[in-house]
Amino acid sequence: MSATQTANHIASRSERFKDLQKTLVLVKPDAVTRGLIGNIVNRFENRGLAIKGMKLIQMDDKLAGNLYAPHEGKPFYNDLVSYMTSGPIVCLCLEGVNAISIVRTMMGATNPVEAAPGTIRGDFAQRLDCNCVHGSDSPESASRELPIFFGEGEILDYDPCHTHSL
Ligand code: IDP
Ligand code: MG
C-alpha cells in the first residue's frame, strides 16, 4: 500500500487535534531550589506536550492569592501562600491533546504519600506542602489560571515539528 493510500485511513488533522488544550503548570519553589526544573520540564517535553509559554518569576501575595482564591479560608491557605511566594517558580503554558488530564496524571496525587512511582510527585516529593508542581485541574481552571501568569503576547503560537506526523 502506498503512503497516499495509508493516509486515507488516518483521521483528518482537525479531528486528531479536536481535544487540543492549553494548561498551566508551575514548578514550585521546592523543585526550583532543588535543581529539578530541567528534569520536570523534560518529562513534559518527552510526553509530547508543547511549551507555548515559559518564565521564571517570584510570586507576591497578590498573585498567589489570585491563583489560590478557590482555597481561601482553608486551614492550609496562609502556609500555602507563604510557601509559594518563598522563592522562584517556573510558569509553563503547555499544549497538547487532552493536556489538562495528561499533566494531572503525570503530576500524581496531591499528597506525595499517595502519589504513584513514575509520577513527578511520586518520584520527587515527600510532603503535601512541598509537592513540586501545580497543574490546572479542569478546562475552567486552566482558562482562569493562564491569564494570571501570561499576558498578551506571552503565549506563542507555533506548530511543534512532531505534530506534523501525529
Ligand atoms: P493540587 O495541587 O493537586 O491541585 P489542591 O487541592 O488544589 O491540590 O491544593 C493546592 C495545594 O495546596 C496542594 O498542591 C498542596 O501543596 C497544598 N495543600 C492541599 N491540601 C493541603 C493540606 O491539607 N495541608 C497542607 N497543604 C495542602
Ligand atoms: Mg489544585
Image (tube, rainbow, N blue to C red):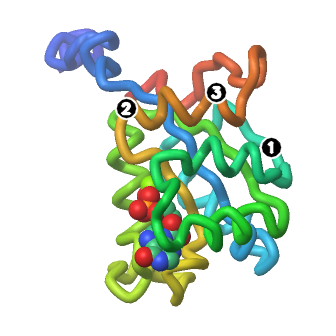
N-terminal of the pair, mark 1 or mark 2, is 1
Which is more toward the observer, 97 or 109? 109
Which is more toward the observer, 127 or 164? 127
- At mark 2, the secondary structure is helix
Q: Which residue is mark 1?
A: 55
Residue farthest along the front direction in this orientation:
73
N-terminal of the pair, mark 3 or mark 1, is 1
Circle 2 residues within 10 Å: few <14, some 14–19, many ≥20 = some
From the image, which quarter does the C terminus lie in? top left
- At mark 1, the secondary structure is strand
Q: Which residue is mark 2?
A: 139
Find the distance from the CA under tag 3 to the CA under tag 2: 13 Å
Q: Which kind of residue does numbered mark 2 sit on? A: Pro
Q: Is mark 1 within 8 Å of ligand 1?
A: no
For this view, does 133 lie left or right of residue 71?
Answer: right
Q: Which residue is mark 3?
A: 147
